[in-house]
Amino acid sequence: MAIRTVDQLELKGKRVFIRVDFNVPQDEKNNITDETRILLSLPTIRFVSEAGGKVILASHLGRPKSKKDPKFSLAPVAERLSQLLKERVALATDCIGEDVQKQIGEMREGDLLLLENLRFHPEEEKNEEAFSKALGSLCDVYINDAFGAAHRAHASTEGMTRFVPVVAAGFLMMKEIGSLEKALVNPQKPYVAILGGAKVSDKIGVIQNLLDKVTTLLVGGGMAYTFLKAEGFQIGKSLVEEEQIGFSLQLLEKAKGKIKFLLPSDHIAAERMDVQAKRKVVKNDNIPSEWVCLDIGPETVKTFSGEIKSARTIFWNGPMGVFEMEPFSQGTFAIAKAIASTSAFSIVGGGDSVAAVNKAGVADKISHLSTGGGASLEFIEGKKLPGIEALRKNRGGLG
């Protein structure tokens, strides 16, 4: 069933609950360090406000252990949002309750109110019906624009849709779905997928699903060393999931004759994970037993970049090394620049990969930056996401 979108609704005078994803990284002083998710939510927020809706914004932030914690308050987000919109965004003291109801009751058309962190209530993650109903009572229209939380069946992403007359998707949600579907449904070939990050176990389903779709699979990051060990290489002190070695070998066998499945051929190895540690470029058969591999090497960068250059569709999730440390960032940045230099339809998903693309200064050259790490992986894996399915089932009237 097709999903209704925000621009199909009558919004004037309506209380419009927009589930956004403002789960943004902050430093120790609560300064927002990456506002990508806030910026990408602006088109939907502006549209509803300009259409005369009373804008009620809701999000989670971090993991506050189901109780009020100033460290996880959305106050810094409300302040930044006010600056970006050049409109006052009021912050509620909670996300349900009499005070919130009163504040909403006093809103005028176009006003903006940000509810306090949904996860201050344990009922949010438990998707409890009473809490879902309480959230639903706040509004006439429900809009989900939080793709990054769509893989969670929480009260604000799934439960409350049963208690609101009209539900629809925001512009960012529809852009995410449309872009990711391009990588799943008849993608243009050659199709190159690049997977990195720490663990094979995090990407098992994705790899299995991509084996039937991609032309080439490039694997880097910590997860590569489980595959290399499965192939019989000595990997020193590099990250490995011993329990995944047998499965990794099966995947390598399954890929043979089907797709190109490329692992790093050289690495930036160091005595320890430290910017001051001795480091050198080593080949697969020459990794020192007491050293740790922390980035792909120049030969691998060249090989991977060559595959990327010929692609017409690209999906990237996960860094090629410990890119947060400058000596081990070059492989990840090189991949970001290689993707940006192509004319392929490119999707970059996952917080680390998006951060790398931003740091490399090539974000504007990527076709689609996905705001959902876990959500985009599950989508590519072929799973149905609860937050999206709720929009298909609970369409309601046109309002």
Image (tube, rainbow, N blue to C red):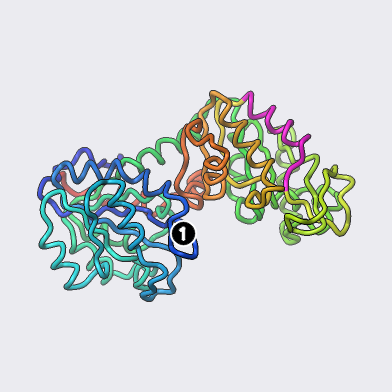
Q: Is residue 60 left or right of residue 26?
A: left
Main structural element of the magenta stretch: helix, strand or loop? helix
Nearer to the camera, 120 or 227: 120
Residue at which label 1 appears? 26
Q: Which residues are magenta?
A: 295-310
Label 1 Cα crowd, 10 Å radius (few <14 / some 14-19 / many 20+): some
Residue 142 locus on image (x, y percent): 23, 53
The x, y position of residue 219, in whole percent, is 68, 43
Q: Identify residue type, mark 1.
A: Gln
Q: Nearer the viewer, residue 3 or 299?
A: 299
Residue 398 position by quadrant:
top left
> Which residue is found at the position 13% from the left and 51% from the top?
14
- Image coordinates of residue 114 in percent, x first then y, are 26, 59
Quarter of the image that includes the N terminus: top left
Residue visible at 33% across and 48% down in the picture: 145
Up the image or down, 194 lies above or below 289; here it is above
Query: Could you say whether the residue bearing mark 1 is in a helix, strand or loop?
Result: loop
Task: Look at 23% across and 59% down and name the residue there.
Answer: 90
Left or right of residue 275, residue 172 in this image: left
Left of 353 or right of it: where is 115? left
